[in-house]
Amino acid sequence: MLKNAWFYRIKAAQRDLINLSGGIERSAEITSISKSHVGRWNNAQDTDLMPLNAVLMLEEHCGVAVVTSVMAELNGRRVTGEAEGVGVSVDVLSACAETVRHAGEVMSAGAIALADGRVTAAESMNIDRAVSLLERECSALRKTLASVRAGDLKVVGGEGK
């Protein structure tokens, strides 16, 4: 088993990408790769990493550069020009509520993991998943707020209210 932080970041991104693409079976259909192989990509304990063609197909399907963004981040870069509007809530209140809900899930996973004074590998995976979802929600909230500032969204009441 690899013990490098980059490996776990890529594996977490792969799991997120598979989830966003509709799960293991749907990802297998999209990539024309067997369910068992996609399952290995989705398994945090397996050392298999997705080939580039599978990453590109799944990212195109779901419209989010999940793995590509992590690879860029690991190399001190960031992805720009991502598809506009993907996952953006048009309602500030619901975007805030979702962000707070996911923050609560991070706190809950952390509290459960730290209850006995130590964090296991499995517990760290649970926290990492919750943090990944929180990051996505924070990004969606920031995009929504930027749209409000730019005048692209009408806030409750609409039409000049």
Image (cartoon, rainbow, N blue to C red):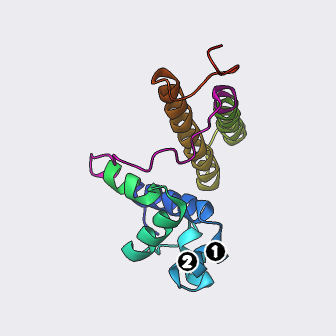
Position of 20 with respect to 70 (left or right) is right
User: Residue 64 versus residue 45: which sits nearer the camera?
Assistant: 64
Q: Residue at x 60, y 59 (%)?
A: 20
Q: Which of the two residues, 21 or 71, is positioned nearer the viewer here?
A: 21
Residue 49 visible from this viewpoint:
no
- Examine the structure image and report whether residue 159 is included in the region drawn in magenta: no
Q: Amino acid at mark 1?
A: Arg
Asked whether disc 2 touches disc 1, contact meaning CB atoms under 8 Å apart, the reply is yes
Q: Secondary structure at mark 2?
A: helix
Residue located beneath label 1 in the image: 26
Would you place residue 50 above or below residue 3 in this image?
below
Per the rendering, the mark at residue 30 is 2
Vertical comparison of 113 with 161: above or below: below
In the figure, 125 relative to 96: above or below?
A: below
Taking the image as shown, residue 112 lies to the left or right of residue 61, namely: right
Q: Residues within 10 Å of mark 2 (few under 14, many from 20)?
A: some
Q: Residue at x 59, y 53 (%)?
A: 125
Q: Is residue 140 visible?
A: yes
Quarter of the image with the C terminus in it = top right
| 99 sits left or right of 4 in the view | right
Q: Which residues are magenta?
A: 74-96
Residue drawn 35% across and 47% down? 81
Q: Is residue 75 magenta?
A: yes
How many neighbours does mark 1 have within 10 angstroms: few (below 14), some (14-19), or many (20 or more)?
some
Image quadrant where residue 118 sits: top right
Quadrant for residue 105, please give it: top right
**Residue at left offset 50%, top offset 68%:** 58
Q: Nearer the viewer, residue 160 or 51?
A: 160
Q: What secondary structure is found at the residue carrying circle 1? A: helix
